[in-house]
Amino acid sequence: MPKLFAPIKPDGYARNPPPQPPARDLYIFHLQGCVSSETTIQGTDFLGNWEEDGFTFLFFSRPDDEKVSNLLKSQPHLTLLDNYHMTYEQWQGEIFSANKIGGFYITPPWDNQHTDITESKILLDPGLVFGTGTHQTTRDCLHALEWVWRHEAIRSVLDLGTGTGLLSLAAACLGSDKTLAVDKNRLATQTAVRNVELNRFSDRILVIQASAEDYMNFPADLVIANVHYEVMKNLIHADDFFNKKWYILSGLLRSQAKEISAQLGQLPVQMLNSWAQDGIWHTFCLKLL
């Protein structure tokens, strides 16, 4: 069964402590294998773990070799491959600050310099997850969302590979009443839920930890899929994928986009718009015929 990550009460945000800026330094342990789901790593210095494709990254705000050593002893299937010390900005690849993309104003919740902006303002705490809106695919998806809404008021959205939840939040800002945000990564879903709460959209957005392919039967007017090429190939051939109305597909490099475009040409959809401002990453907007 997939795991749901949704607040119990809509006012959960009011009970949470104010968001804090990220840790300046990150101490990262790269492991082969996945930590048992029942494992709890204690201490305020532990920031989270990122698991993907059979590998784990453990994040701490200060060196904690003892905790990692004890974990390896208790779970012998794990192997320490390497460890790193880097700044938060080095991990994210950028210094996250307030950023205007189209009609959206995306700002860290700890930034108190932009309190006067209210229209289409999105509070975003990326934590250790990538997706602040600066990557070209995310930017183009935000532009695509605005383009779709100029043509039709979308009431329901399926967001596959939600990451920080930014695209789901943008859809809610535009007027979506119901969004299912799906990501296979546990840390991503936890981060997305925190951002849903920050923006007080708990009544509109539900976050689920699951594979994108498993939720193609969710009824929605619009599918957003900013995912890896291998996932995209499976999605466009899923039985339930093309029973929606609108589609925003992204995360594709030039050669991948060419192949996906050729396959889409054999399916009952019409390509209405596309974005490739850097000539490398491609985003498609489609509509069911």
Image: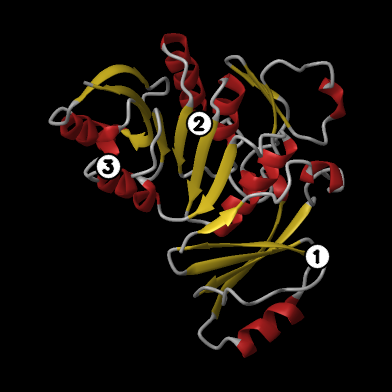
Left-right relation of 213 to 81 = left
Mark identifier at residue 138: 2
User: Amino acid type of disc 2?
Assistant: Thr
Query: Seen from this angle, which residue lies furthest top?
Result: 150
Front position among marks 3 and 1: 3
Query: At x 78% / y 35%, what residue is drawn?
Result: 109
The answer to whether mark 2 and mark 1 are in CB contact below 8 A is no
Where does label 3 land, which residue?
Answer: 240
Q: Is residue 160 above or below residue 41?
A: above
Q: Residue 158 placed where, x, y %?
A: 44, 37
CA distance separating discs 3 and 1? 43 Å
Query: At x 52% / y 26%, what residue is drawn?
Result: 139
Q: Residue 233 placed where, x, y %?
A: 26, 45
CA distance separating discs 2 and 1? 30 Å
Q: Is residue 169 visible?
A: yes
Rendering quarter of residue 245: top left
Where does label 1 land, which residue?
Answer: 45
Q: Is residue 131 visible?
A: no
Rendering quarter of residue 279: top left
